[in-house]
Amino acid sequence: MPELPEVETIRRTLEASILGMRVASVVQNRADVLRSHDDTASNATQADALLRRGTIASTHRHGKELALIAEDGRCLCIHLGMSGQVRILESQRDLRVLSHVHVVWKLTRGTETRWLAFRDVRRFGGLWGLPSRDVASAERWSRLGPDALGVRASVLKQAGKASIRAVKAMLLDQRVLAGVGNIYADEALFRAGIDPRRPCDTIRPKEWTTLAAAIRTTLVNAVRQRGSTLRDYADSNGVAGAAQLSHAVYGRAGEPCRTCGLALTGIRLAQRSTVFCSACQR
DNA sequence: CGGTACGCCTGAAGGC
DNA sequence: TGCCTTCAGGCGTACC
């Protein structure tokens, strides 16, 4: 569900409420949401993986991956998959109205108490513990390309120059670029005026530059609007985003292009629903 | 190796 | 009303 703008919004709202809070206790309702980075992780490592103690000192995001980092450097890495949510609750009673809550942390600071909940209906998401703050070297994170929020054209050019696959498929490849998902791939390609089906090796240098700028602008605008709420995305306070209101193409197949008025085209590309304007995107 | 197809889960929406 | 199919913002794996 969440792409870079949604994960960044969650990170920012989390920072505002949990930095400096100490983990008092953890309740885990489902064992399978806690994953291991590799098969050699010992039981002791796993037991500590959920950040059962310590104070939350900082947060970090790369692409769609999120991490909470404790003062001693241990990390909790969070991936939200399609339906994952992280929520902050001021009262334990507020938990009762939430379904599919898999892990709950009780956080304290002086007389303050808050609850941090990880929930995920479809369970495509998960949690990973790390013994050090060096999240970039975690196996899961080390495979990621540069963060899409500041993508340079050279990254796209390099990855695309010898590739015959559709440009949209490349944008969705987290090894090339981290953070773009199905919504913002379509939106960025519309902004750049590029047909999502174009083979990468037909894209000219100037177009890569345009596309890189379009990705940055699309994502920055979406972060400013606190992400897109289509179905169930919400920030850590449960507040919906507003970026869906300004989508130019995503979810608008058959509706008029806001630039030229032609009906937008909907296709399947790389097993993902794809919408574009056949006049504005070439 | 590059690229594509499928499966993992649940729930909402639409067709009949 | 209810049953069935399809689809959904992600990603890992198997396979060509």
Image (cartoon, coloured by chain):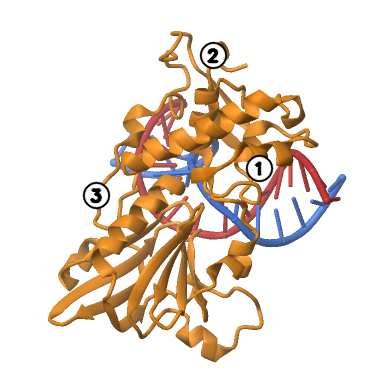
Chain colours: A orange, B red, C blue
Q: Which residue is mark 1?
A: A155
The CA span between labels 2 and 3 is 34 Å
Q: Which residue is mark 3?
A: A239
| Residue A180 visible here | no
Q: Of residues A149 and A102, which is closer to you in this image? A: A149
Q: Nearer the viewer, mark 2 or mark 3?
A: 2
Query: Same chain, marks 1 and 2?
Result: yes
Residue at the spot x=54%, y=35% of the render?
A185
Callout 2 secondary element = loop
Q: Position of residue C15 (x, y in %)?
A: 82, 52
Label 1 CA crowd tier, 10 Å (few <14, some 14–19, many 20+): some
Q: Locate residue A120 relative to residue A23 in the image: left or right.
A: right
Q: Which residue is mark 2?
A: A280
Label 2 CA crowd tier, 10 Å (few <14, some 14–19, many 20+): some
Residue at the spot x=50%, y=24% of the render?
A191
Q: Position of residue A110 (x, y in %)?
A: 16, 82
Which amino acid type corresponds to the residue marked 1 in the rendered image? Val
Which amino acid type corresponds to the residue marked 2 in the rendered image? Cys
Callout 3 secondary element = loop
Q: Residue furthest top?
A: A261
Q: On what subunit does the disc labeled 1 rest?
A: A
Relative to A171, residue A197 above or below? above
Residue at the spot x=51%, y=35% of the render?
A215
